[in-house]
Amino acid sequence: MNPLTLFTRRQFCLLLLVLLLPRLGHTQTAATPYPGLVQPADAPVPLYCTPGTEARAAAMAARCAAALKWMQQPAQLGFAPRVTMLVLGKADWARYAGKGQVLGMPHTNGPAVLVVAGEDNELWQHTLPPTDQLPAALAQRVKTLYRTPTGQLSAGKMFDLTVVHELAHLAYRQARLNRPRYWLEEQFCNLLLHTFIASQEPAQLPALETFPEAVVQGTDRATLKYTSLADFDRYYNLMEREQPMLYGWYQCRLHRAAARIYDAQPDGPHALHQLWVALKDSQATYTDAQLADMLRTKVSPELAQVLTNW
Ligand SMILES: [Zn+2]
């Protein structure tokens, strides 16, 4: 090769590098997928949050990382989903949350993005039933558990735990499990949440369990537009956005069922793993009778009773 050609190429490459470097640096800054959010450098999962919510975001990211590690254990799912976490204040919610999602409702947005609120909001404050509609002992527990430093009642402590429920959705979808019923996917997510909290963060169990108990006890079933599992499946895609309170009532009943399924395991927690395996092996379609039979034989009678005794 002509030494002059070599020299010229080297010079050309150097020149290209000098010209491109500032542009590359600029591109990296501008290429954040979420302009306006901060990306804490030491977060244990990919995390973007609204400025000012860093402390809450760090706590949720830590829970998220612990849950992923736990899900990966062969005795649980043997699988952990990919996730990017967004912790959003009110202004950023409108920008980055899923279309039409009510402020404060934890949800997944796409195959690997998890969205949660970073500050107290109306949903968390208004989903708790008035305490004067509750039995006295339950009302007292609600007041003790969910009172915020400003003196208001807010279910934020419970909503913060549901980040684990959303991770379960990501696992379900990324593993491409069949979905014989929407309610069954939700039941799986609630069972995973309950099993994780009961076994890994038992001090949080009262915050997880008291809210569903209060909502179910404080709601007059006769006032609800729908109450059957069949209607939950029929209206599933609209209910969360259009009727969040009704959706919450169903979720609270599924939460309570998760606690019953968990508590009924005589030899330690295995229902979650069995349900995961059963769903992996499941068909897309079952009659209700076939589904109840599959859940009874492959997981537990208490899970089948969610369908048969709803
Ligand atoms: Zn869900």
Image (cartoon, rainbow, N blue to C red):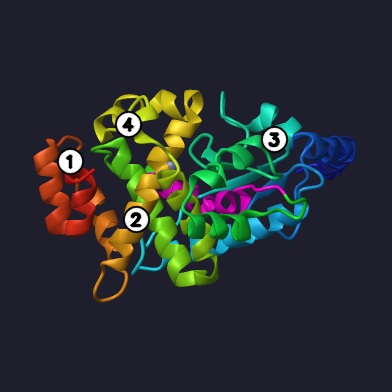
Task: For the residues labelled 2 and 1, say whether their Cβ atoms are less than 8 Å apart.
Answer: no
From the image, give the main secondary structure of the stretch colored magenta: helix
Indicate the secondary structure of the residue bearing disc 4: helix
Disc 2 to disc 1, C-alpha distance: 22 Å
Disc 4 to disc 3, C-alpha distance: 34 Å
Q: Is residue 165 magenta?
A: yes
Question: Is 57 on the left-hand or right-hand side of 225?
Answer: right
The x, y position of residue 59, in whole percent, is: 67, 59
Range covered by the magenta-colored residues: 152-172
CB of residue at label 2: within 8 Å of ligand 1?
no
Which is closer to the viewer, label 4 or label 3? 4
Residue labelled with disc 2? 258
Question: Is 252 on the left-hand or right-hand side of 272?
Answer: right
In the image, what residue type sits under mark 1?
Gln
Does label 2 or label 4 sit earlier along the sequence? 4
Does label 3 or label 2 sit earlier along the sequence? 3
- The numbered mark at residue 283 is 1
Which is closer to the viewer, label 3 or label 2? 2
Question: Is 273 on the left-hand or right-hand side of 16?
Answer: left
Can residue 292 be seen in the rendering of this structure? Answer: yes
Residue labelled with disc 3? 33
In depth, the one of 68 and 88 nearer the eye is: 88
In the image, what residue type sits under mark 2?
Ala
- The numbered mark at residue 232 is 4
In depth, the one of 165 and 126 nearer the eye is: 126
* Residue at image coords 26%, 69%: 265
Asked if residue 214 is positioned above or below residue 204 in the image, the reply reads above
CB of residue at label 4: within 8 Å of ligand 1?
no
Disc 1 to disc 3, C-alpha distance: 37 Å
Q: Quadrant of the C terminus?
A: top left
